[in-house]
Image (cartoon, helix red, strand yellow):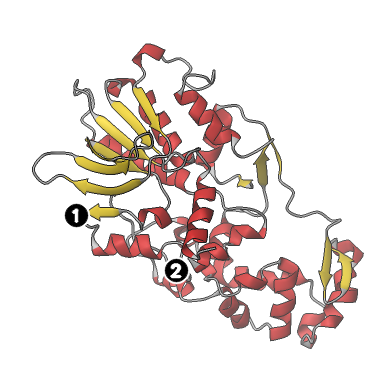
Amino acid sequence: MKCLNICLRKRKELRISITLLISSALLRILRQFVPLGHGKNVKVAVIGAGEAGLAAAYELRKQVVISHYLRQVIESEEEFTPIILTVARNIMETLEL
Amino acid sequence: MRVPISHETTWHYINLFKLNTSIFVNNDENNIFYIKENRVYSDMNRNGVFKSIYPAFNLKYSERYKQWLNLQRRVYNKYLHSLSPDLRKEIIETKPYYSKAIEVLDKLSYLDAYESVGLSKDAISMLSYLDGCTQYLSLSLPEILHEYYTADFDFTYRIAEDMINLPNSLYAALCDKNKYGYTNLDKDKLGQIKIKMNTPIEGIYELPSEKGISLNYVESSTTKKVQEKFDYIICAIPFTSLRKLEVKPAFTEIKTKAINELNSTPFKFMPNSAPL
């Protein structure tokens, strides 16, 4: 947590969302596991509607070969926010600010 | 928000949705340093730093006549430029194991690195003011090198108007309201999507009896706790949030360690983790 408080990127501005990169990695992994062209409805949940979650949902939906699959994005916040804000909020909660 | 050119995934979506960007100015010759009650232009040609900032610090003779960027560069020359290209790229790679040279770096803080190139305490202090990194001296050296190596501080852009335009565009594409979203794809063939906002997740559980994963969350409209089964789950939340979720069965020890330690000081190279 200390690192987030003194994050290097704060030198100029807020952190960039590294989770976008994580999302693309997750998608690559998912494609290995999802039985493509299976034919039945498969439910996939994406937790988090930051850039990473929305990008993951976007890419999943684009896959025409798995177009029968149902996807769902679940977000804990009322409005979707960039992931950086979620991180900032978590820090504040932890520090009870 | 700053978008360095090396953040290719972000650029993929910026280009896809044709978002406007503009240059994010990091350094400008008209920037002003205000250090120890001296106010000077950062422009090297004006020699203001030499004339006003240097005398304010008790520098060694060998440090007094060297440009501060050259003093700072000693660290990068010793710890980055001296590495072979193969070793150097390990700094930005996620690997199960790292070379000895990288493991050595991993044990050093930014301050250790400055001291190891023979800079005096006052020189380090001056550089940290000039570089704006006073509070980062305790960070690990790899964390600094990681961004220096990919030129994160040198070529930066910002999304015009606001960074929120990026998630907004993704959301609009999911709702078929963005014309750049799914070009050349038949809208009827796209998958169904349901977005649930204001729905806090409480836990992720693997179902032992049947294939699938169960998700516990609180339904926003009824505030009732719901358990829903999915075939797959993609967790796209920060590790700081993931730590709060109940996950059963628990992640392996090494994965839990990675989740708990990431974003903690000091930065450590984490082993390549398996899918969550």
Res A59 → quadrant: top left
**Which of the marked residues, 1 or 2, is nearer the chain's N terminus?**
2
Circle 2 is placed at which residue position?
A: B102
* Labels 1 and 2 positioned on one and the same chain: yes
In the depicted view, which residue is nearer to us: B166 or B219? B219
Q: Residue at the spot x=61%, y=40% of the render?
A: B163
Q: Is residue A15 above or below residue B254?
A: above
Res B44 → quadrant: bottom right
Q: Is residue B66 left or right of residue B152?
A: right
Expressed as whole percent of the image width and height from the top left, the position of residue B22 reads 71, 38
Q: Is residue B163 above or below residue B179?
A: below
Q: Residue at the spot x=76%, y=55% of the render?
A: B27
**Residue farthest toward the front in the current orientation of the protein:** B222
Q: Chain of mark 1?
A: B
Q: Chain of mark 2?
A: B
Expressed as whole percent of the image width and height from the top left, the position of residue A63 reads 35, 24
Circle 2 crowding by C-alpha within 10 Å: few under 14, some 14–19, many from 20: some
Is label 1 in a helix, a strand or a loop?
A: loop
Which quarter of the image is occupied by the C terminus of chain A? bottom right
Expressed as whole percent of the image width and height from the top left, the position of residue A54 reads 44, 35
Circle 1 is placed at which residue position?
A: B249
Q: Do the residues bearing badges 1 and 2 touch, measured as CB atoms within 8 Å?
A: no
Expressed as whole percent of the image width and height from the top left, the position of residue A85 reads 54, 49
Amino acid marked by disc 1:
Pro
Q: Is residue A46 left or right of residue B44?
A: left
**Residue farthest toward the left in the current orientation of the protein:** B209
Can residue B120 be seen at all in this image of the molecule? no
Can residue A14 be seen at all in this image of the molecule? yes
Q: Is residue B181 above or below residue A78?
A: above
Q: Residue at the spot x=27%, y=20% of the render?
A: A68
Rounded to the nearest angstrom, the CA distance separating label 1 from label 2 is 34 Å
Amino acid marked by disc 2:
Ile
